Amino acid sequence: MAGDYDPVSPEEHRRGVALPEDDATVRESFESTGSGSDIVYRDHLDEDPFDEKTHHRQGSYDHEDGIGYPVEPTRIRPRKSSSRRILAALVLIVGGAAAIGVLAAIGYQTPTVKRGSQHITLDHIYNGTFTPKSQRLSWVSEAADGTFSRIDDDNNILLLTAQQRNKTEVLVKAEDVKDPRTGKTLEWDDWQLSADMDKPKATRVTFDGSDVVFNGVPDWVYEEEVFSTDGALWWSPQADTIAYLRSNESAVEIYDLQIFNPTNDAFNINPYTSTVQMRYPKPGTPNPLVSVHTFSLTRFEHASANGVASSAAVSQAKSTLTWPDEYPQDDRIITEVGWVGNDTLLVKEVDRPSRKGHVAVFTGGKSVGEVTRKLGKEGEQGDDGWIDHGQNIVKIETRADGSGIDGYLDIVPNADGYDHIALYAPVTASKPVWVTEGEWEVTSIAGVDREKGVAYFVAANPSIDRHLYAVTLPSSPSLVGYKPEMTPLTDVNVPGYYDVSFSPSAGFYSLNYRGPNIPWQRLKSTDETLDVVLEDNAALNATIAEFHQPVEIRSTLNHAGNELNMMTVLPPNLDPSGRKHYPLFINMYAGPGSQTVDNRWKIDWFSFLACEHKYVIARIDGRGTGFKGRKLRNPVMDNLGQLEAEDQAALAREMIKRKFVDRSRAGLFGWSYGGYATAKTLEAYPDLFTAGISVAPVTDWRFYDSVYTERYMNTLSANVAGYQNSSVHNVTAFQGQDWLLAHGTGDDNVHYANMASLVDKLTQERIRGWSMRVFTDSDHSINTRGANRELYEWMTEHLLKSWGKGGNIKH
């Protein structure tokens, strides 16, 4: 945390920052024990100049949505709004840019601050008191590198350049963007279709779109689990060809989502409920059938110019892509599509359980591709683990002077199982040249300066940090003598968590520092001639200094041959002597590839519990979690819930060795996968814990979507015993447990059927002691009609009723 403190040296950070006198003995205590969709080609519109093209790894699980607010971590996340809900046709735009050990001896603690006297309340959590500010920049690829747009406080859209930030051009005044029916100024996320806009000539490209066939947009499960976006079309670099995904979900079974009250007022009575139907594939049921197609504008225009009828010209311009040994449509997932040359396309496929796969490359506009890489145990992964889905491909090319190399970059596991940047050159290469290496992982390729021959990337090095690096690319196609030179662009000698957004040509970037101190944001150039502050959050710095603050300690726990990242959040002025006792509350997520322990700054519900109710909060990233290599991730495969529970129990056993931890008040909290992991831990270790809270949990993987579930559990027919063991099934273990359950009936992600099934089992077996809240029509985030605040107040009140406050003098 930050405030009025003196910066510490890098060496002090490596040793662990000194605690104030009243907390120094705490460290000693811790260290002592060790709708349908067709494509329309429209030829007289300009592409949206503010369409920032970014690349995100599916495996990078970002909980940033929760900074300053008590929301659940979002791996199994709430459904995003999709353009598919409102569009009947997709418009293509021509001319646009296309054994338990002990705690590690050295732990890192957040820097000491001068503590204030104000108390953190839930009001502060909800009203944004502790929310860092940042500016939203959208790089404009159609203008000079470094040009970006942003929205000011008055909702005007401004155009700026990195070199001349004080010189702005108002592109759109907020007052000019009004709803013609109400006169209200539209907000950024509002959409309004102008009735008087010119009607350009449109050419229909696809003709089979329906309520079950989608062209250019993904169906529900592909948006949720594969692409993480509501678009599934990809322009070639020269914008003369477009590739698109066709999805046919006619065989996907329908899930009826019941809506009890579609209004925002609970006192509006609707005598009859309504349902929303969604096609949602579950394990053992059909997945959507997908294929990849291209449409060549060049071929279409050539045919049209030669008098070919429009419909025939369209047919001549379209291609369906195929490749040798491709998997049947009912046993495959297309995980990535990307252009790796002006006329060269790459497609990745895996089989349904994501155990094996291919990379196919299509050169020269061909419709038949060449398989250049194999994925899975017999391929790049080289082990029995799953294949992660990600959007990582970045094209590189020769420079204007002829130097450099044509090929592409990808993030793949090396021989030791760590995700690193691999160069494939030429594009048909089957073996990589490693651009990065080490016992750490690359999380994203942030940008490539093709003229300078430099790639920029973010790495989890160490795993709880995120640092920005630059690395040189080959200067010659021969690759002879190529030795990558890696340079950190953030201070790797001190803990830090950064994210970054690069301009299209990678000459400029917005650098966002997320912690462990107060976040800030800077605009920088890669040639180091520009470095300006966009946001320093000075006001937040001053505000937080007025409050009681928790003490955060990051360390590791050696368990079952693994060094697991661990974090504790302690009440201020904690007495470690054992004279006073404090409840232990473990906050978990634990999902495959996720991360709960990191160096981001935040004040949230757990901070509130630590400061105001004197609870000790603990977190651990156990087996199955991310950013420490496949050897840590893979063991949970085909048997979710078992090892996660073991590792959470290991954390609890280690924590209750502390003299100040009250063994009789040890509990768990989790949301979504965390709610599931909480249930499995209580089920396996009922004598270790006295309370648990599961919010919106999966309770049986047969209820969740097939793409996510089968990636980690295999198909249902291949792993019947695994599915049974991984479900929450031994309900007698919950007899007398103080267990809170909460779920929203409108959850379109983790369906309410999970909770209904669990409650049915508890009822049938006459299990008592648990309590439950149902939140009408709330989705996975539990937000409808004030539900989120009510949920957190209910949980807080229940904890205080069951445990009371911490810091009690032992009698």
Image (cartoon, helix red, strand yellow):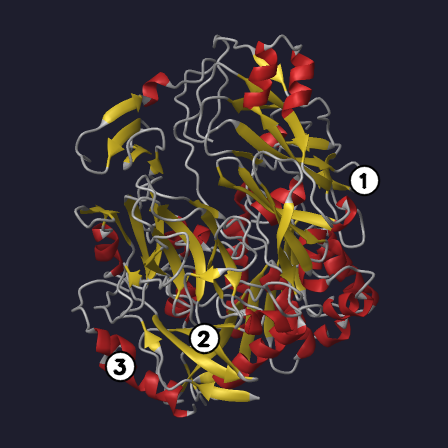
Q: Nearer the viewer, mark 3 or mark 2?
A: 2
Residue 305 vs residue 66: left or right?
right
Q: Residue 425 versus residue 590: which sits nearer the camera? A: 425
Residue at mark 3 to residue at mark 2: CA–CA distance: 23 Å
Observer able to see residue 657: yes
The answer to whether mark 3 and mark 2 are in CB contact below 8 A is no
Query: Residue 158 location, x and y as percent?
Result: 28, 28
Under mark 2, the amino acid is Met
Q: Look at the picture and state if 533 lies above or below 45.
A: below
Q: Secondary structure at mark 1?
A: loop
Q: Which mark is residue 566?
A: 2
Q: Which residue is mark 1?
A: 251
Place residue 471 in its image quadrant: bottom left
Observer able to see residue 747: no
The answer to whether mark 1 and mark 2 are in CB contact below 8 A is no
What residue is drawn where x is 71% and y is 47%?
324
Under mark 3, the amino acid is Asp
Q: Earlier in the sequence, mark 3 or mark 2?
A: 3
Q: Earlier in the sequence, mark 1 or mark 2?
A: 1
Q: Which residue is mark 3?
A: 22
Q: Secondary structure at mark 2?
A: strand
